[in-house]
Image: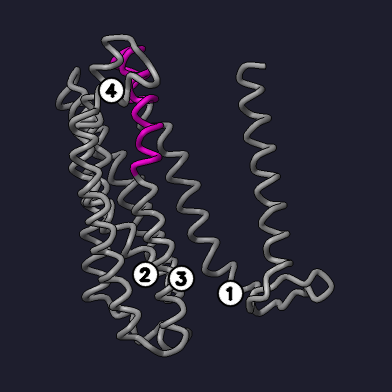
Amino acid sequence: MGTAGVAYATIISQFLSAILVLITLMRTDSAFKLIPKKVSFTWSVIGRIVNIGLPTSVQQGITAFSNVFVQSYINVFGSAAMAGWSSYAKIDQFNLLPMQAVAFACTTFVGQNWGAGLYDRAKKSLRTAMRMSFVMTATLIPFLMLFSRQLIYMFNQEPAVLEYGSLMIRLMAPFYLLSCINQIYVGALRGTGNSRVPMFIMLSSFVAFRQVYLIICSQLLPGNIIPIILGYPAGWFIASLALFLYYKFGNWEEKYKITA
């Protein structure tokens, strides 16, 4: 069935996962037990969910769309570069999973403690999550650097593609530590109910700044793919710096203590 078979398999696996989650929720004895007959809508709660969740979805959607423009700069270097980038992107998804998982957990822990008025404990959750994310990512980086070529080989065996793909991994891998910073700060801030400012910071860094950076690099350094590849770490750096400054010096804490 080719590509269609992969698509069908993805849809079926997602459907089965959803069914199994529903069954688990209905059979559990925990506080979050799902009882279909008691399902109802509380508009104030729905409004709060939308207020927190919508900025996150907007950010992720626009950021994903902006990657199309990044791809256009890679395409200039030919089919081998395109294939190398495609192979790298598959590996990148796995590389980001550990820090994203910790960031999601950080959102939960911060949210629980912030809602209970345990603000110091919420901040401690952020520090713990940051350390965990750094350790996990730092452990992964040497593996990526040493086996970059072998990782690309799993997806494409063409020599030129291997060169481009392994170069991308080696250039990007050390900068995943920057991504840890912005992921954890965003996760923690969302846990306090503050999702709009992180959205604007991430969009400004990952979309606006990155596009300006790529335009400048493509004009000043034509024919050099390395500055183009480094557009991602550049965006991570700007986002991490802005989030750190906002978290430390922004007047957000008292505002969200009141609304938490």
Judge from the rendering whether residue 226 lies leftward or rightward of residue 183; answer left or right.
left
Judge from the rendering whether residue 31 lies leftward or rightward of residue 186; answer left or right.
right
| Quarter that holds the N terminus | top right
Q: Position of residue 81 (x, y in %)?
A: 31, 18
Q: Disc 3 designates what residue?
A: 108
Say what amino acid the circle numbered 3 marks. Answer: Thr
Tag nearer the camera, 4 or 3: 4
Tag nearer the camera, 2 or 1: 2
Which mark identifies residue 188?
A: 2
Question: How many angstroms separate mark 2 from mark 3 (CA)?
Answer: 8 Å
Q: Earlier in the sequence, mark 2 or mark 4?
A: 4
Say what amino acid the circle numbered 4 marks. Answer: Gln
Which range of residues does the magenta coloring cover? 72-95
Tag nearer the camera, 4 or 1: 4
Q: Disc 1 designates what residue?
A: 48
Q: Secondary structure at mark 1?
A: helix
Snapshot quadrant of residue 29? bottom right
User: Within 10 Å of the Cα at label 2, are there few (<14), some (14-19), or many (20+) other Cα atoms?
Assistant: many
Say what amino acid the circle numbered 1 marks. Answer: Arg
Q: Secondary structure at mark 4?
A: helix
